[in-house]
């Protein structure tokens, strides 16, 4: 059984780039207006009614095994406010938490079919609870509205759309890293977590065999290999995604576990709710270290590639040039 983590605060697991990216998002002009408009546009009560009408509400008499997994996660993370859990019929593999004041969790039937073991399903539930415990829900719900329905209906006139969308997506991806950590703390089995990412990336085995070790080696290859152009492609492939790639998530989670922070939390050395001492400056420092090793390197790769492309373009279209002048005559000795 997992070690209980009484009164654990979300500060114990949150990725510093998550908090730093959220602060950056809040600093965008017009952001608070977007919050108000989006909250008005999407009523939590209205969304809950949709799932009450067209999904299955999990409980002791309805999918009791799934209900018991939720209980296990709540017990380990010492979270008293039990969110509703719905299962909706969809072939898409997905799970999400949604809502503002009283958020609830939704899992698709496709996710339940893909993640066959109780531990893998527990990992997915714990991930969504991590979002709730971290207070992500207002911003993630708004992100869901914007990414699903578009921005034009709710954004204030004059706000540049692309910078806002990119900043929102950047934070959204980093919030996934935080909740992956929460899920590992609730499950306390890194192999199961890695297998869950393997399933999400490649599906079920269908009678064949798969290897967690080979998948993690693949994750390491993606994380460290490639030339400048590969890094450019990774940046472009990621910029408009709401979730990081599964190999990236697996590698990032293992890096955190191996850092010693995970073991310290399991041993009881973690921030408690109500006694947090949060230093945003430390978040920025740690986030800067993270980005300096990753995003800034990628940005430098992009600048290098664009400079080379510009030079090649200029060379191709510059046209014929005058021959260089002859060297000046040398004086006799």
Image (cartoon, rainbow, N blue to C red):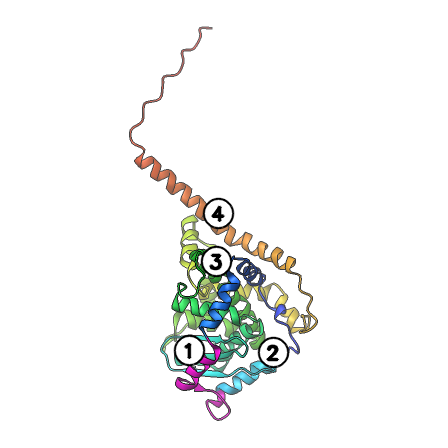
> Measuring 35% from the left and 39% from the top, which residue is drawn there?
312
Note whether residue 78 is visible. yes
Instruction: Give coordinates of residue 308: x percent, y percent.
Output: 40, 41
* Residue 77: mark: 2
Q: Which residue is mark 1?
A: 111
> Measuring 41% from the left and 84% from the top, which residue is drawn there?
55
Q: CA distance from mark 4 to mark 3?
A: 16 Å
Does the stretch in magenta take in 84?
no
Q: CA distance from mark 1 to mark 4?
A: 38 Å
Find out whether the residues at labels 4 and 2 contact each other: C-beta distance under 8 Å.
no
Q: Which residue is mark 4?
A: 300
Q: CA distance from mark 2 to mark 3?
A: 31 Å
Does the stretch in magenta take in 53?
yes
Q: Which residue is mark 3?
A: 223
Q: CA distance from mark 1 to mark 2?
A: 23 Å
Label whose residue precedes the other's in the sequence (3 or 1): 1
> Which type of secondary structure does the marked residue at label 1 adopt?
helix
Label whose residue precedes the other's in the sequence (1 or 2): 2
> Which type of secondary structure does the marked residue at label 4 adopt?
helix
> Which type of secondary structure does the marked residue at label 2 adopt?
loop
Q: Residue furthest left?
A: 320
In the rendered structure, which segment of residues is drawn in magenta? 43-65
């Amino acid at each position: 059984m997992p070690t209980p983590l009484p009164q654990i605060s979300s500060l114990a697991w949150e990725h510093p780039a998550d908090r730093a990216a959220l602060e950056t998002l809040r600093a965008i002009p017009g952001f608070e207006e977007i919050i108000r408009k989006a909250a008005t546009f999407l009523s939590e009560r209205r969304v809950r009614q949709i799932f009450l009408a067209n999904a299955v509400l999990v409980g002791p008499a309805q999918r009791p095994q799934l209900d018991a997994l939720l209980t296990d996660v709540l017990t380990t993370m010492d979270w008293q406010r039990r969110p509703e859990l719905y299962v909706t019929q969809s072939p898409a593999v997905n799970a999400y938490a949604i809502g503002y004041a009283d958020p609830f969790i939704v899992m698709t039937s496709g996710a339940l079919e893909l993640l066959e073991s109780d531990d893998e399903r527990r990992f997915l539930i714990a991930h969504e609870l991590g979002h709730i415990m971290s207070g992500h829900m207002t911003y993630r719900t708004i992100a869901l509205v914007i990414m699903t329905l578009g921005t034009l209906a709710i954004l204030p006139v004059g706000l540049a759309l692309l910078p806002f969308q990119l900043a929102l997506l950047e934070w959204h991806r980093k919030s996934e890293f935080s909740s992956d950590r929460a899920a590992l703390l609730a499950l306390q089995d890194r192999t199961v977590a890695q297998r869950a990412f393997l399933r999400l990336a490649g599906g079920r085995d269908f009678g064949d065999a798969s290897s967690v070790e080979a998948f993690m080696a693949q994750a390491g290859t993606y994380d460290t290999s490639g030339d400048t152009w590969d890094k450019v492609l990774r940046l472009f492939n990621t910029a408009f995604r709401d979730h990081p790639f599964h190999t990236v998530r697996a590698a990032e989670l293992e890096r955190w576990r191996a850092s010693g922070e995970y073991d310290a939390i399991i041993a009881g050395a973690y921030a408690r709710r109500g006694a947090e001492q949060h230093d945003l400056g430390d978040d920025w420092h740690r986030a800067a270290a993270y980005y300096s090793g990753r995003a800034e390197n990628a940005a430098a790769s992009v600048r290098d590639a664009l400079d080379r492309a510009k030079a090649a373009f200029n060379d191709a279209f510059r046209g014929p040039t005058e021959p260089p002048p002859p060297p000046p005559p040398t004086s006799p000795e």
